[in-house]
Image (cartoon, helix red, strand yellow):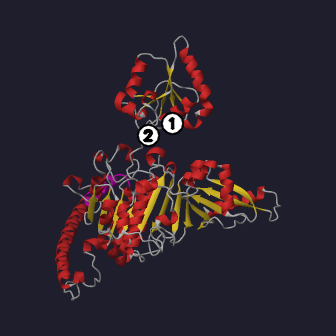
Amino acid sequence: MDVTDREIKTKNAECKPAENKGSSVQIKVLFFARARDLTGLTELPLELSSGSTTQDCLNKLVARFPSLEEILGSMVLALNEEYTNESVIVQDKDELALIPPISGG
Amino acid sequence: MEINGGGGSAADVSRILSELETLKTVKSDIDRRISALEAQLRDTTNIEDKNDTVSNGSCPLISAVHSNINHDLTPDSVYRYSRHLLLPSFGVQGQSNLLKSSILVIGAGGLGSPALLYLAACGVGRLGIVDHDVVELNNMHRQVIHTEAYIGQPKVKSAAATCRSSSDKEVFSRINSTIQIVEYQEALRTSNALEILSQYDIVVDATDNAPSRYMISDCCVVLGKPLVSGAALGLEGQLSIYNYNGGPCYRCLFPTPPPTSACQRCSDSGVLGVVPGIIGCLQALEAIKIAGAVGEPLSGRMLLFDALSARIRIVKIRGRSSQCEVCGENSAFTQQQFKNFDYEKFTQAPLSTLPVKLNLLPEDSRISSKEYKEKIDNGEAHVLVDVRPEHHFKIVSLPNSINIPLASLEVRLPEISKALKEEEEGKAGASLYVVCRRGNDSQRAVQCLQKMGFNSARDIIGGLESWGCDVDPNFPTY
């Protein structure tokens, strides 16, 4: 699965013009559970100005998908598969995961 | 060189057949002798086992069959669990730990079924099962511990019968008659949780609702029990271990419960049967690792399973939160506070899985399914709008109903106006009825329609479920 992810990343990078000299970063947002239902997506490439925090990412996502608001207060946020908080600065090619709890069984 | 030369063939066949016959007779004699000797050996060692216990197993044994055994596994256990014992990283010590452990599984549904099957099979000494539900036909696709014969009967009874026989007729379906199974045919509440959970080493959360998850996590913190928590919905699953070796509890991760609208149930959103099956198996695995004291349990990490894309991700999650209201440094969450805590209020959701019954409309804006049937029989001019999602509509629908999902109702009002006009041709005033699965969304739709000028809109109380119940028992329910 890691291999596939890397391949996707490479493809994305190839599609983009080879500029962006530090002015912006591109990250990948992963949606899980309810976040998937609300956005209708499993992942989304997101471009942000460099120096943006995870909170900035969330703001941008909510602006695009207002219904995400309902789960903002109750989910795990992971950056590159590790727990993160809202004030961490995201880097180019980072992967931000929105993980709301599932309660079904 | 020819082996089967002409006329020699018939003689050869006869010789082979005769030799086969002889060998088979000898073989069956040998088998009989082996079986008898094995029985004799079992009886002998059982007696010596008892002697062992009395003598604490420390004195030298005279019997040759019993020479060097430095553990407490019976010969039967050695044979039954031999494949565990052969694992260098599990071995005698792991199995011995397992046999002495006690594990409580809360929920005998989609997650609990496989978890219980494996925990029973692998030889957990004492296995508790909590569930208040009965087995239903629509459980069978994923709750694989239950059999059709138990539909309508308590899940706890059904699950316990599969794990170990409770009567002779079930002798073929039991998995492990040597372990102890404890049945709790009741809903877990703050009033009984402390008493039940305190009797076990490890707790497995296999429930299906948010308030139960918070309640079980808090109870585990108060009692200092490790919690193996699994969840599954749709095509996704989640798994983690809470309150283990200084790791986080469920509340450290999710201090604020999600809003009711975000808490979905399998009965509403659906679930692919094998998904809870996989998560339930992983719960059994993690519980076995803790009980056997082997490996690296999934604490401080969360496993995310995505069935559709065949991906498993393991995310490092936060450690214990010092601010946590239950397990944090300054928390003084006591057993008494636990008992008084209102989990249904905290999560705005019921502990039971019973669907909510809203009552948003005045009586004159609603009709019963029986009344609607009369209107059809009387040939009353009307339009019936079914506001369920399209994939629900495809399962079953009432004749002549038009499907406009609630989410797109406002933009598709012209379709309703048009249908009403067509229906009114040659007749005076057509009525507008709205139906859904259970009679909640239909009320929301009527509120919306009345606001948009369709003042006569009315909903069918109890939706298609009531139609199936009160009008047409052959109407498929789901």
- Whole-percent x, y for residue B325 in the image: 47, 67
Magenta residues?
B1-20
Q: Is residue B157 left or right of residue B251?
A: left
- Whole-percent x, y for residue B237 in the image: 49, 57
Instruction: Answer few, some or many: residues within 10 Å of disc 2's Cα (few below 14, many 20 plus, some between 14 and 19).
Output: few
Where disc 2 sits, the SS reads: loop
Q: Main secondary structure of the magenta part?
A: helix
* Quadrant assignment for the N terminus of chain B: bottom left
> Relative to B4, is B227 above or below?
below
Viewer-side residue, B128 vs B329: B329
User: Could you tell me if residue B208 is visible in this image?
Assistant: no
Q: CA distance from mark 2 to mark 1?
A: 9 Å
Residue B168's disc number: none
Q: Which three-letter amino acid code belongs to the residue tagged 2?
A: Leu
Membership of B33 in magenta stretch? no
Q: Earlier in the sequence, mark 2 or mark 1?
A: 2
Chain bearing tag 2 is: B
Membership of B5 in magenta stretch? yes
The residue that mark 2 highlights is B358
- Whole-percent x, y for residue B473 in the image: 35, 30
Chain bearing tag 1 is: B
The residue that mark 1 highlights is B444
Q: Is residue B193 left or right of residue B256?
A: left
- Whole-percent x, y for residue A32 in the image: 57, 55
Q: Which three-letter amino acid code belongs to the residue tagged 1?
A: Arg
User: Could you tell me if residue B176 is visible in this image?
Assistant: yes
Viewer-side residue, A63 vs B129: A63
Extreme-bottom residue of the structure:
B60
**Marks 2,1: beta carbons within 8 A:** yes
Quarter of the rendering containing residue B66 = bottom left
Where disc 1 sits, the SS reads: helix
